[in-house]
Image: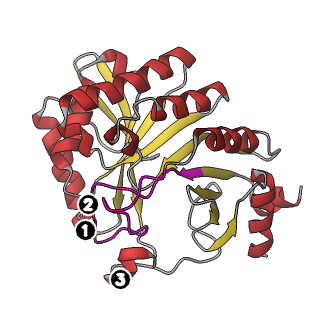
C-alpha cells in the first residue's frame, strides 16, 4: 500500500470535547469552561474506531481520547459516556487512553466512580485502560492528580487495570514539577522507581504495582500557546513521533494530521480521511 511506505504506523486520537475546567495559558486548543460540551456522539466514535481497526495498515492497538477535558461527561451527569467509549474500544481489541487534568481527583466520590467504572471494563475484557495526566508548570492539579494515583495504588483491582502516565513539557520548570509530584507520591507511601530506558517507571504501594510513563512534549504554535508566545517550535509536515503519525478527529467533524493538515470528516470513512490527509503531505 502506498501509505504503508509513507507512514508505517498511525495513531488515532478522538477529541471528544473542547470544554475544560481549566483555562491554561499554554492550551493549544483554547479550551475553557465557557466552551460548550458538544460531546462527540458515541455512534460516531464507534464508527471511527471500527473503521480505523479495519483500515488495512499497521496501527497502534489503542485509541487516544483528548479534549478539552475527557472526563467532561461526568461533570454534566453523563456517567455512562466514558465507560461506553472504553467498552467499544475493548470490544474491538483496542485499549483506551484518556488524557486528563485529573481535577476530578479532588472529589472522592466522583473519582471513585470514574476509576471503578474504567477498571470494571478493563477486567471484563482483559484490556488495560490508561490515564494520561498532564503535570507541568501550567497545571495547578498536583493535589488532585496525587489523589487519583493514590486511589489507584490503594487498590489491587484498580492498579492492575489502570496504568497511569504523566505528560509534561521539555522545560526545566516542568521537570521540576514532575520531581515535586514524585516526592508527594512518596510522601503518600508510594514507591516511585527510577526511569527505565524505555521511559517506564515502576510505582508500588504494598503489594500493588503500576507501570507509569513520563513523556515530554513540546508546545505548538496554536491556540493560547501562540497568543501568549509560549511556543517552542512550529509544527512541520512530520512530527517527532518515533512510531508514526497521529490522525486526530475532532468533535466538530474535522480531521487533523500532525496538527498541520486538516480536512472535513463529514461522512467519509477513516481510511478516506487518512488518505486525503496523506496526499497533502506529499
Q: Is residue 123 magenta?
A: no
Relative to 177, is 114 above or below?
Answer: above
Q: In this view, does 247 lie to the left or right of 180?
A: right
Q: From this viewpoint, is residue 105 visible? A: yes
The residue that disc 2 covers is: 175
The magenta span reads: 13-38
Q: What element carries label 3?
A: helix
Q: Position of residue 1 (x, y in %)?
A: 89, 55
The one nearer the camera, 43 or 59, is: 43
Q: Which residue is drawn at 19% across and 56% down?
A: 140
Please tell me whether mark 1 or mark 3 is closer to you in this view.
3
Q: Do the residues labelled 1 and 2 touch (CB within 8 Å)?
A: yes
The residue that disc 1 covers is: 172
Q: Which residue is drawn at 74% across and 74% down?
A: 281
Q: Which quarter of the picture shows residue 272? A: bottom right
Q: Is mark 2 on a helix, strand or loop?
A: helix
Amino acid at each position: 500500500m502506498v501509505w504503508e511506505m509513507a507512514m508505517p504506523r498511525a495513531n488515532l486520537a478522538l477529541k471528544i470535547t473542547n470544554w475544560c475546567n481549566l483555562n491554561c495559558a499554554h492550551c493549544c486548543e483554547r479550551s475553557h469552561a465557557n466552551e460548550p460540551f458538544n460531546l462527540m456522539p458515541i455512534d460516531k466514535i464507534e464508527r471511527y474506531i471500527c473503521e480505523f481497526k479495519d483500515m488495512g495498515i499497521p496501527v497502534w492497538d489503542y485509541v487516544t481520547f483528548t479534549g478539552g477535558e475527557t472526563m467532561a461527561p461526568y461533570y454534566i451527569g453523563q456517567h455512562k459516556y466514558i465507560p461506553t467509549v472504553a467498552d467499544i474500544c475493548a470490544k474491538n481489541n483496542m485499549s483506551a487512553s484518556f488524557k486528563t487534568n485529573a481535577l476530578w481527583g479532588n472529589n472522592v466520590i466522583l473519582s471513585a466512580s470514574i476509576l471503578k467504572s474504567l477498571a470494571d471494563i478493563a477486567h471484563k475484557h482483559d484490556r488495560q485502560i490508561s490515564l494520561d495526566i498532564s503535570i507541568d508548570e501550567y497545571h495547578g492539579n498536583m493535589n488532585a492528580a496525587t489523589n487519583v494515583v493514590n486511589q489507584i495504588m490503594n487498590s489491587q483491582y484498580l492498579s492492575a487495570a489502570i496504568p497511569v502516565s504523566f505528560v509534561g513539557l521539555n522545560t526545566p520548570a516542568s521537570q521540576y514539577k514532575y520531581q515535586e509530584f514524585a516526592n508527594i507520591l512518596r510522601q503518600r507511601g508510594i514507591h516511585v522507581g527510577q526511569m527505565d530506558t524505555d521511559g517506564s517507571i515502576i510505582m508500588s504501594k504494598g503489594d500493588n504495582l503500576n507501570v507509569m510513563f513520563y513523556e515530554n512534549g513540546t508546545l505548538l504554535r496554536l491556540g493560547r500557546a501562540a497568543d501568549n508566545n509560549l511556543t517552542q517550535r512550529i509544527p512541520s509536515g512530520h512530527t517527532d513521533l518515533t512510531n508514526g503519525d497521529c490522525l486526530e478527529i475532532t468533535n466538530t467533524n474535522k480531521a487533523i494530521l500532525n496538527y498541520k493538515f486538516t480536512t472535513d470528516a463529514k461522512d467519509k470513512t477513516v481510511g478516506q480521511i487518512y488518505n486525503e490527509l496523506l496526499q497533502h503531505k506529499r
